[in-house]
Amino acid sequence: MADTRQRLADTVAVVTGSARGIGRSIAERLAGEGARVACLDVSPARLEAAVAEMRTDGLDVHPYVVDVARRSEVHEVFQRIEADFGGPVATLVNNAVWARYQAIDAIDEETLEQMLAVGLKGIIWATQAATAQMKRRGAGTVINLSSAAAVMGLRDSVAYCAVKAAVTGLTRAAALDLGPHGIRVNAIAPGMIATPASLGKFDQPTLQARERNVPIGRFGEAGEIAAVVAFLASADSSYINGALLMADGGLTIAGT
Ligand SMILES: NC(=O)c1ccc[n+]([C@@H]2O[C@H](COP(=O)([O-])OP(=O)(O)OC[C@H]3O[C@@H](n4cnc5c(N)ncnc54)[C@H](O)[C@@H]3O)[C@@H](O)[C@H]2O)c1
């Protein structure tokens, strides 16, 4: 999405899990605001296709295939990004997720380990690598994708709720560690956003019931989350730090 404000002109941004869904929308928005964007994803074919499409819209986006769960791979890719872009990263968006939705009795070891590896360890590895560069720059912003699931219970989603709550905890603690270096760390909690991954989980009657639960009566669009990310990446949010910003149409303040 082109944005005449160009709040991120001449900066380098990294978005994890940006081959599709909300991450792709974030990459488009940050590039539209003038950032040069490194798009990270574990899925090579999907990433190449997404970046090629974004480039046809004139966006300055570049693909990097990486598994964020692997610490050494992540550190290596951030070194490559700094060399390729000729300068340090200014904005990191930790968006990648790997999720399976299971009730407490059904959770198996392999699934839980993969969810923690991508959704929790992955954020820590990318934040370590990106903020090493931001410290040299004396400024930076880290934005973590949490979820409304961090603050409300969802059925059959024990591991997802736990991982997303952990993201809010690590956001606050990292904000304390990194504040003295001029680095702000914030999290966003989207409600139900209309992406193929989220809509595909439910049948039509369930989707309609869920939509009725949202006080403003509709699911969100990926672009509405990308707009919040761009705000948190920009100087317009210069005094927001360690926060969890709800972007859920009021879902989490609704009663029955
Ligand atoms: N869609 C929603 O309704 C919703 C609601 C609340 C929060 N969120 C959060 O927003 C973020 C994006 O959600 P989405 O629905 O667009 O997700 P999605 O599943 O559509 O996309 C996730 C992306 O992450 C990539 N990925 C998976 N494992 C990876 C790994 N190991 N390394 C690098 N990349 C990897 C995938 O290939 C994919 O492109 C997630 O953090 C999610 O928890 C989404």
Image (spheres, rainbow, N blue to C red):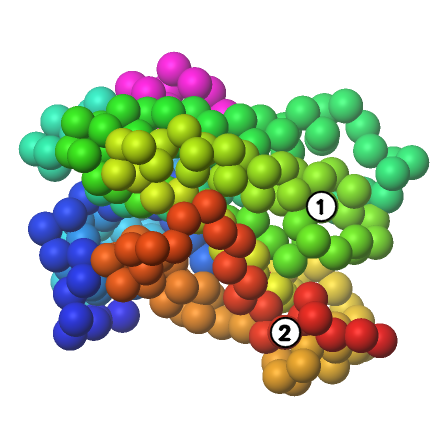
What residue lies at 86% left-to-right and 43% top-to-bottom? 103
What residue lies at 15% left-to-right and 74% top-to-bottom? 4
Q: What stretch is highlighted in magenta?
A: 66-77
Q: Is residue 79 above or below residue 143?
A: above
Helix, strand or loop for disc 2? loop
Looking at this rendering, what residue extends furthest in the top direction?
Answer: 72
In the rendered structure, which amino acid carries the disc numbered 2? Gly
In the rendered structure, which amino acid carries the disc numbered 1? Cys
Q: How packed is label 2: few (under 14 Cα within 10 Å), some, or many (20 or more)?
A: some
Q: Is residue 158 left or right of residue 39?
A: right
Q: In which quarter of the image is residue 215?
A: bottom right
Q: In this view, does 222 lie above or below 115?
A: below
Magenta run includes residue 149 = no
Q: In this view, does 248 lie to the left or right of 254?
A: left
- For disc 2, the marked residue is 250
Q: Is mark 2 within 8 Å of ligand 1?
A: no
- For disc 1, the marked residue is 161
Q: Is residue 68 left or right of residue 134?
A: right
Q: Nearer the viewer, residue 66 or 43?
A: 66
